[in-house]
Image (spheres, rainbow, N blue to C red):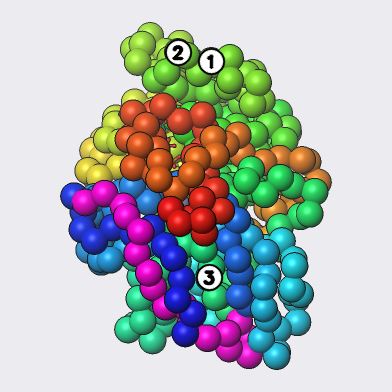
């Protein structure tokens, strides 16, 4: 067992603070990783604050992990010491159910082992995330990060990147499609970059007028303020596809009005309360409302390779670990441009 420094919280109303855990010994199929950077996803905040229920403490958040391989088990084939690697939201799954066999481990019928606030597949051993100096992960759940990508900027690809890439691919978004991305935060800014790289015409739908110039710099060709009710009339029937990344309660039905015939709105944001939607919203225009959960491991590698080819990384604000609570507060206020990433060297030094 290797003693490992982390930043953890002991309960939903408590700040994060230094905490030591034991990482498991490196097994034959394991990869030991020294973490360089870990992104702060809004899901970290939802879970630390127990906004989705069922949170377990102590909790070490963090599922946008990049670092370097420090050791590999005897049977590891794909990685060598020194490789740049990443770990996302999952560290294991049953590997035998139909979704696992179809490379969709996120939908494992036994429930994947998530990177934190979860357990290993033995359903006993708690998992601890990337606000830590080191992690030991089964080879199958370790991703290769293209060497050309900036490591801090690559960290958010492991969740924000794949969560936006997967629905764009599943719904076959293509060149020329009209795409609306709702909410310009961590997920939203990756959604804009990725959809634009796929050739779509992207309109940013935001509550923050101050983000317009950034939206255009990120690749959006249109920007509309959703705090103005006229926007919903002006853009009625415009989009083939809308990606909704809003983390807070909002009127999903109003956004569905901006879809064209056979259009689809995909929810990736997870507001705490349920939405209320009338049947006519779907019936008129044969519209689809769907959701999407991160992406499988093979698709995550495909996304990383796509980002390598197109030179895509997240726009990040790198912070020392001591500033994590402040970063949580700023993220909740939509004051993030566009992902906070923890420099784990600050934790290694003493945090
Ligand atoms: P984030 O960086 O905080 O961005 C959320 C954005 O939503 C904000 O920047 C803001 O954009 C908009 N927003 C916030 N409050 C709003 C409100 N009251 N009304 C309208 N818009 C509002 O969060 P994130 O890390 O991108 O995560 C977004 C959501 O996705 C979270 O709920 C997270 O848990 C979830 N998530 C889901 C998955 C999945 O697999 N489905 C994976 C990762 C994260 P504007 O300022 O532009 O309005
Ligand atoms: Zn996430
Ligand atoms: Zn499974």
Q: How many marks?
A: 3
| x then y, percent, for residue 277 | 27, 37
| Residue 340 vertical placement versus 86 (above, below) | above
Dot 2 falls on a residue whose secondary structure is helix
Dot 3 falls on a residue whose secondary structure is strand
Q: Residues within 10 Å of mark 3 (few under 14, many from 20)?
A: many
Q: Decide which of tag 2 and tag 3 comes sooner along the chain.
A: 3
Q: CA distance from mark 3 to mark 1?
A: 38 Å
Closer to the camera: disc 3 or disc 1? 3
Q: Decide which of tag 3 and tag 1 comes sooner along the chain.
A: 3
Observer-nearest residue: 187 or 282? 187
Q: For the view shown, which residue lies furthest in the front direction?
A: 350
Q: Residues within 10 Å of mark 1 (few under 14, many from 20)?
A: some
Dot 1 falls on a residue whose secondary structure is helix
In the picture of the structure, the residue carrying the numbered disc 3 is 135
| Residue 133 vertical placement versus 174 (above, below) | below
- Which residues fall within the magenta stretch? 14-30
Q: Are marks 1 and 2 in contact (CB under 8 Å)?
A: yes
Q: Is residue 105 left or right of residue 290?
A: right
Observer-nearest residue: 322 or 89? 322
State whether residue 107 appears in this view: no
| x then y, percent, for residue 339 | 51, 38
Which residue appears at 38% of the width and 50% of the height? 43
Q: CA distance from mark 1 to mark 2?
A: 6 Å
In the picture of the structure, the residue carrying the numbered disc 2 is 209
Q: Residue 212 — which label? A: 1
């Amino acid at each position: 067992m290797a003693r490992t420094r982390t930043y953890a919280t002991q309960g939903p109303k408590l700040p994060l603070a230094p905490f030591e855990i034991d990482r498991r010994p490196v097994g034959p199929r394991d990869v030991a990783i020294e973490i360089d950077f870990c992104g702060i996803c809004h899901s970290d905040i939802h879970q630390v604050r127990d906004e989705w229920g069922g949170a377990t403490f102590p909790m070490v958040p963090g599922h946008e992990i990049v670092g370097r391989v420090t050791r590999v088990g005897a049977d590891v084939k794909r990685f060598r010491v020194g490789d740049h690697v990443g770990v996302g939201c999952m560290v294991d799954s049953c590997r035998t159910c139909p979704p696992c066999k179809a490379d969709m481990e996120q939908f494992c019928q036994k429930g994947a082992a998530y990177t934190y606030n979860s357990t290993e597949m033995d359903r006993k051993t708690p998992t601890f995330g990337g606000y830590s100096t080191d992690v030991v992960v089964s080879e199958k759940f370790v991703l290769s990060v293209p060497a050309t990508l900036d490591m801090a900027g690559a960290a958010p690809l492991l969740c924000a990147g794949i969560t936006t890439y997967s629905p764009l691919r599943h719904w076959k978004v293509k060149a020329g499609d009209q795409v609306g991305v709702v909410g310009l935060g961590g997920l939203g800014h990756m959604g804009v970059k990725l959809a634009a790289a796929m050739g779509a015409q992207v309109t940013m739908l935001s509550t923050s007028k101050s983000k317009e110039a950034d939206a255009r710099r990120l690749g959006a060709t249109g920007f509309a303020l959703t705090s103005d009710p006229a926007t919903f009339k002006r853009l009625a029937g415009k989009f083939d596809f809308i990606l909704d990344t809003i983390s807070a309660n909002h009127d999903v039905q109003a956004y569905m009005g901006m879809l064209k015939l056979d259009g689809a709105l995909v929810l990736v944001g997870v507001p705490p309360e349920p939405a209320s939607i009338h049947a006519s919203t779907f019936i008129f225009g044969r519209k689809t409302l769907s959701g999407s959960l991160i992406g499988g491991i093979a698709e995550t590698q495909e996304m990383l390779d796509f980002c390598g080819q197109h030179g895509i990384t997240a726009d990040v604000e790198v912070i020392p670990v001591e500033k994590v609570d402040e970063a949580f507060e700023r993220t909740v206020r939509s004051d993030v441009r566009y992902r906070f990433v923890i420099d784990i060297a600050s934790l290694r030094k003493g945090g």
